[in-house]
């Protein structure tokens, strides 16, 4: 479930919001978990690195093994990953603009899993794909086109 909204990066606006010092427009996540933030006003990319508690090796293994295809998706979306155990997971697709949602619970097995998700009923657009297991939540951006 989404938590409370927090500012990860600030300082792009003056205190009275009358002028800006940058214009962040998109983000990407590196394999190391760093957040890259593009600034099209300054032609820069900022790197935000997490310095808190590191996830367990099992959590990191799941995080880095999740692959989404095809990109962009149309009628079907495939989520491929390795699971260290048999477990129930929740898969949720949330449109980043309208909030339209699709949720499914699936049982996955130890080892490689290739989950097929029917997305034919979803409207085209950008979605967040959240894969949640017992101790792990992984989020990826997914583009759906028709």
Image: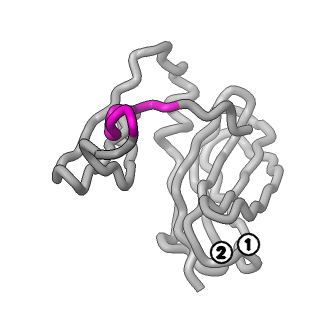
Choose between 13 and 114: the one closer to the eye: 13
Residue 118's mark?
Answer: 1
Q: How far across and down, in percent of the image, does residue 144 sit?
A: 57, 74
> Residue 35 is drawn in which quadrant?
top left
* Coloring applied to the structure: one colour
Q: How far across and down, in percent of the image, does residue 32 sit?
A: 35, 33
What span is in magenta?
7-16
Choose between 139 and 85: the one closer to the eye: 139
The single residue placed furthest to the bottom in the displayed view is: 146
Q: How far across and down, in percent of the image, does residue 29 sit?
A: 39, 43
The single residue placed furthest to the left in the displayed view is: 43
> Residue 93 is drawn in which quadrant?
bottom right
Residue 76's mark?
Answer: 2
The correct choice, above or below, for 66 with respect to 122 in the image is above
Residue 9's mark?
Answer: none
| Position of residue 131 in the picture relative to residue 46 (left or right) | right
Q: Are marks 1 and 2 in contact (CB under 8 Å)?
A: yes
Q: CA distance from mark 1 to mark 2?
A: 5 Å
Circle 1 SS class: strand
The verdict on residue 92 being magenta is no
Q: How far across and down, in percent of the image, does residue 101 sit?
A: 76, 61
Magenta segment main secondary structure: loop
Quadrant occupied by the N terminus: top right
| Position of residue 107 in the picture relative to residue 138 (left or right) | right
Circle 2 SS class: strand
Q: Residues within 10 Å of mark 2 (few under 14, many from 20)?
A: few
């Amino acid at each position: 479930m989404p938590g409370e909204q927090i500012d990860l990066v600030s300082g792009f606006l003056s205190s009275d919001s009358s002028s800006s010092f940058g214009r962040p427009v998109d983000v990407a996540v590196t394999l190391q978990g760093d957040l890259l933030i593009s600034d099209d006003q300054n032609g820069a990319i900022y790197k935000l690195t997490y310095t808190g508690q590191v996830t367990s090796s099992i959590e990191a293994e799941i995080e880095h093994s999740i692959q989404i295809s095809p990109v962009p998706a149309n009628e079907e979306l495939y989520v491929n990953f390795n699971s260290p155990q048999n477990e129930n997971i929740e898969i949720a697709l949330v449109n980043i603009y309208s909030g339209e949602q699709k949720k499914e619970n699936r049982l996955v097995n130890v080892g490689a899993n290739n989950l097929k998700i029917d997305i034919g009923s979803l409207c085209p657009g950008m979605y967040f794909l959240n894969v949640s297991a017992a101790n792990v939540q992984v989020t990826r951006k997914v583009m759906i086109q028709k």
